[in-house]
Structure formats: structure tokens, C-alpha cells
Amino acid sequence: MTEPIAVPAKTIRSSISEGTLTLSGRLLIDTLLQLKGSTAGTTLETVHCIDITDLSQMDTAGAWFLLDHKKRASQHNISLEIKGASHEQAQLIATVEKNMPPDDLEPAKPLTIADRFETYGRKVMRALRMTVELISFLGQVIATLGGIVRHPSRLRLTSVVHHCQEIGVSAVPIVALMAFLIGVVLAFQGSAQLRQFGAEVFVVDLIAISILRELGILLTSIIVAGRSGSAFTASIGSMKMREEIDAMRTLGLDPVTILVVPRVLALILMLPALGFIADISGLIGGAMMSWIELGVSPAVFQTRLVNNTDVWHFNVGMIKAPFFALIIGIIGCYQGMKVGGDAESLGRLTSASVVLSIFMVIVMDALFSVFFAVVDV
């Protein structure tokens, strides 16, 4: 019968003689509590040396315990010596000592007004630099598009069709559902307010103008920015991390022609179509809720929509669509090209792409609203 192998107990023993603390046994993380209990009555003034000659094992926690004891002794102007360490133990103690935090860390200085101005100035300069780079990138894309117009054979038609499917066809369900619910909400909230004045029928005008002119294309652009803009940054950024874009340049291929132009063209083609689908879905949702909540039949809704809604409300939304698409495509591809060699930059720039795209779409929508108000459209 095989006898079980005896495993030494995880114990530590200590004794003090003439200012020397002698340790024997195993100085491990499991025995530190036991060691602290056995040396509870020991003061720093009574120990001037720690002898670890008889230690059979010591881990990182044990080395930290010795160095912490030495550090606290030095703070009381007591010189504490650690002797008897083997070669391996001495290496472990030296490694732990090298990685211990320094004692002379200065407290953080309070920020002055000049420091705050410097921080804001640096942020402004970074924003200006990024603006210049975005404009330069936009010019590069437009120049590449001009070259494709002159030489149509350079256009990657298969890539354009693929991105049209990913951007447009795959996004139809979420865009249609979003617009349908927006129409429902507008009809419900509008009816609740207009009923107080006996003007329930004007809910048709509210729904039509809000969806056709603003909400249909704006909310569609926000969804596309979060869905496709982030996908552009992630896919191009992943290629940048794997140095595939550098390999393209080495082979004499233009990454803008191959990666950026098909995505931007697909966005410009599909965003107006998605906006049109959003308009139709929003009107259907508004008509259904008007019928349920106000008793406005679909025939009355259609008649009032056709007679009282100017076609320019629809045109305004469609005019905005290509500009929103260009903004989303340029920002998404630009941020992808800025990705470095680490995953942290990929995640950070993907988030920045979505935030910046949505912000710029809203800013552009505000500028269009001011412009159309000035020209009385």
C-alpha cells in the first residue's frame, strides 16, 4: 500500500534574541497573519535585525512583509538589516523592493487659472486640428470621386452594392419601426393637446410637417450614424491595426478608393431611401393613432395630408439626406483611418465617431432649418 506523501504544514515560527528577530518555516501569504499574531508585542525599537536563514520558503507577500517592516523602521530612524537570505530570496526581495511605491510622492498641486486656460487651449487646438484634418480628408475623398467620374472603371461596384445592402436593406426594419412609433407618439401627444382647443383635425398637419420636414430624416440619420458609422470605423480600424492598409499602399493601391469611396457612395444612395421609408412609416403610424384616438379615418387623413401639406416639406427632408450621409461617411472613415495599433484606440475612436457624427448631423440640421427659414421654404 502506497503511503501518502507528507506535506509540510504552512507554519512560521519567530523568536527574538538580542534585537534579532529570527524567522523559520515558511513565510507565505497564508502564514503572515500567524506571524503578525506571534510578533504582536514586538516594537520597532526592540528589533534591529531580521534573520531569515532558516526560512524554507518565501513568496512575494513574505518579501513585502520584510520590506514593509524595514520601511517603517527607517521612518523612525532605525536601521533594520535583513540577513541570511539565499540567492533566490535576495532576488525576490530586490524585485519587490524595486516595484514598491516611492515615499516621496508629492501631493497634486491645485490647478491655477493659468493651468485651466492651458487645458482649455489645448482642447481647442485639438478640435481645430481635427477640423482641418476632416476638411482635408473630405477634399481627398471628393478628389478621388472626381477621378472615378473621369475613369469609371476605378469604381468598385461590387463593394458599393455590398455596402448598400449592409447600410440600406439591413436597416429597413429598425428604421421603419422607429418612424412608425414616432408617428404614433406624435399623434397621441398632439391629440391630447389639440383636443383642449377643439382642433383635433390639425394633428394631421402636425404629423406631416414634423415627420416629412424634420424627424423622419433626422432620426434616420442618427440611427445610421450609430449603426453604420460605427461599423465603418470598426472595420477600417481593424484593418489599420492588422496593417492591411499599409499593405495596400505597399502594393500601390489607394485605401481611399478601395475602402472609403464605396462606403460614402453607398450612404449617399441609401440614406434618402431610408428617409423615404421612415416618412411613409411615420405617416402610417400617425394615421393609425389618429384613427384610434381621434376617430380621424384614413380617408380624411389622406385628404387633409394631400390638400394641406406642401410638397416642399418632403423635399426639404430629401435635400438634407445626402449631406447627412456625407457627414456620417466621412467622419466614420476618418476615425477608422486614425486608429492606432492597440484595441483601446479602436474602441475610443469608434465611440468618438458615433458621438461626432450625431453632433454634426444635428448641427447641420439646425443650419438647414435657418437656411430654409431665411429663403421662406
Image (spheres, rainbow, N blue to C red):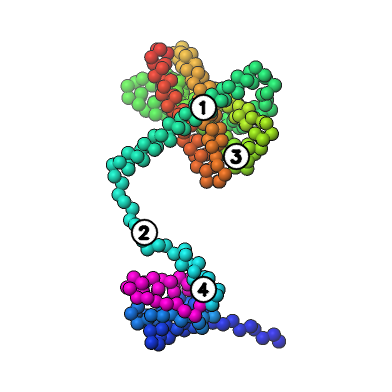
Q: Which residues are magenta?
A: 61-85
The residue tagged 1 is: 136
In space, the residues marked 4 and 3 are separated at their CA atoms by: 45 Å
Q: Alpha-carbon neighbours of circle 4 within 10 Å: few (<14), some, or many (≥20)?
A: some
Q: Nearer the viewer, mark 2 or mark 1?
A: 2
Q: Is residue 298 visible?
A: no
At mark 4, the secondary structure is helix
Q: Nearer the viewer, mark 2 or mark 3?
A: 2
Q: What amino acid type is highlighted by mark number 2?
A: Leu
Give the overall secondary structure of the magenta segment. Answer: helix
Would residue 365 be found to the left or right of residue 338 on screen?
Answer: left
Q: What amino acid type is highlighted by mark number 4?
A: Ala
Q: What amino acid type is highlighted by mark number 3?
A: Lys
The residue tagged 4 is: 90
At mark 3, the secondary structure is helix
Check the image and report above or below for 41 versus 133.
below
In terms of sequence position, does the residue under pointer 3 or pointer 1 come before the other? 1
In space, the residues marked 2 and 3 are separated at their CA atoms by: 39 Å
The residue tagged 3 is: 240
In terms of sequence position, does the residue under pointer 1 or pointer 4 come before the other? 4
Q: Is 218 a magenta residue?
A: no
The residue tagged 2 is: 105
Q: What amino acid type is highlighted by mark number 1?
A: Ser
**Contact, mark 3 vs mark 1 (Cβ under 8 Å):** no
The residue located at (39%, 26%) in the rendering is 190
